[in-house]
Amino acid sequence: MSESRTHVVGAGVAGLAAAVSLVRSGRTVTLYEASGQAGGRCRSYFDVKLGCAIDNGNHLLLSGNRGVMRYLAEIGADDALLGPASASFPFLDLRSGRRWCLRPNRGLVPWWIFDEGRRVPETTAWSYLGAMSFATAGLGHTVRDLVGDDSVLFERFWEPLAVAVLNTPACTGAARLLWPVLRETFLRGERACRPRIARTGLSAALVDPALDFLRYRGAVVRFGRRLRAMGAWQGRATDLDFGTETVALRRGDSVVLAVPPSAASSLVPGLTVPGRSHTVVNAHFRLPAPGRLPPELPFLGLIGGVAQWLFVRSDIASVTVSAADRLAAEPAETIARKTWKDVAAALDLEGAALPTYRILKERRATFAQTPEEIRRRPPMRGACTNVYLAGDWVDTGLPATIEGAIRSGHMAAQAVVRARNP
């Protein structure tokens, strides 16, 4: 009898993580991707206008992201990220010009909140105790419900954190989704919250090594294969219709659907998925010279401007604006001028002409992570016994981040293995 196969549909980081985990478990895998490249919303490409490779989005990871770190180790890309030897988060208030650095301490006791040189300026140690309220946040609580919105700490810590993690404003963002982030990073001490970014690009860190690993281990990778329908009979998926071909599923075969929520709902009748989404806008600028940020800290949190984060890689400065639905409605040149003002102030380039730029609008970057929408996240298992869901929109208990996407892929792979080895 021929060996059973797992068909992973979707080669974003969730699908890649699932495929890698399955192959490492000894499973035979075919990976399908509708487009011509892997990575989904987490990849690099060569931009002709800028004359260099850029990432389609900017992502700040943390050393406590155990799913990401496990994945990097599995694909042999342990050195693909860079960051400081200790946790440091530099910030700039664009209105006043004030700069500071948030620096958690080693160990589990957070004594850094009692040190004025380590915490957010003009805050008290006791104001940080509000973090513990997230442990008991109800399904209907927003971030603002728990910490209010009239404090310096809200403006300089909770709002930037909520927008960065949830891609949703703190006034509507689900508080429950912030707790696992706090628990697994800041509340585990400095070693778990060291900032990390891709050394040379997202594809070089998270995508290309995974594809190399899969092909070397015998997995089949097929691009240009958009799944149009999935046949089912008596609670089991029976075939995959890719338009130009139909792949029959044999007994023992399984499917991991690692596709966007809208695609999943069209393939799985009756599947409830999050419906609302928020946009992320990324602006990339070609600087006349390498940006002036420390090489070990090539990023900067921005308060009081349009952008929230600035990243510098050589002579490319990139800014991210999360929950950017209104901004995305503006023309590219308007967005460029607004965000360039932030970049110029941060890099001491006031008065410099607007350089060559690229504006990327990711309309459905993540689902809107509100209390209402998180109730619509489906479980990993669907109606078909041999179909598993993966993606940052699946109910992992984590926010819709790279960590959440990768961990969903790991969870789906583990479920496939358990089903084959009860």
Image (cartoon, helix red, strand yellow):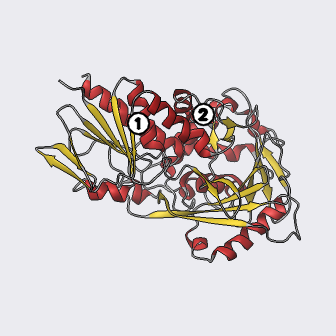
Image coordinates for residue 142, horizontal then vertical, percent: 51, 57
Image coordinates for residue 12, horizontal then vertical, percent: 46, 47
Q: Residue at x 18, y 50 (%)?
A: 231
Q: Quadrant location of the C terminus?
A: top left
> Is 127 situated left or right of 1 in this image?
right
> Is 98 situated left or right of 175 in this image?
right
Q: Disc 2 marks which amino acid?
A: Gly
Q: Which residue is mark 2?
A: 64
SS class, disc 2: loop
Name the foreground residue: 290 vs 274. 290
Q: Which residue is mark 1?
A: 18
SS class, disc 1: helix
Work out whether 333 lies above or below 8.
Answer: below
Q: Quadrant location of the N terminus?
A: top left
Mark before the other along the chain sequence, 2 or 1: 1
Dot 2 alpha-carbon crowd within 10 angstroms: few under 14, some 14 to 19, many 20 or more: many
Q: Which mark is residue 324?
A: none
Q: Disc 1 marks which amino acid?
A: Ala
Image coordinates for residue 330, horizontal then vertical, percent: 61, 77
Q: Nearer the viewer's eye, disc 2 or disc 1?
A: 1
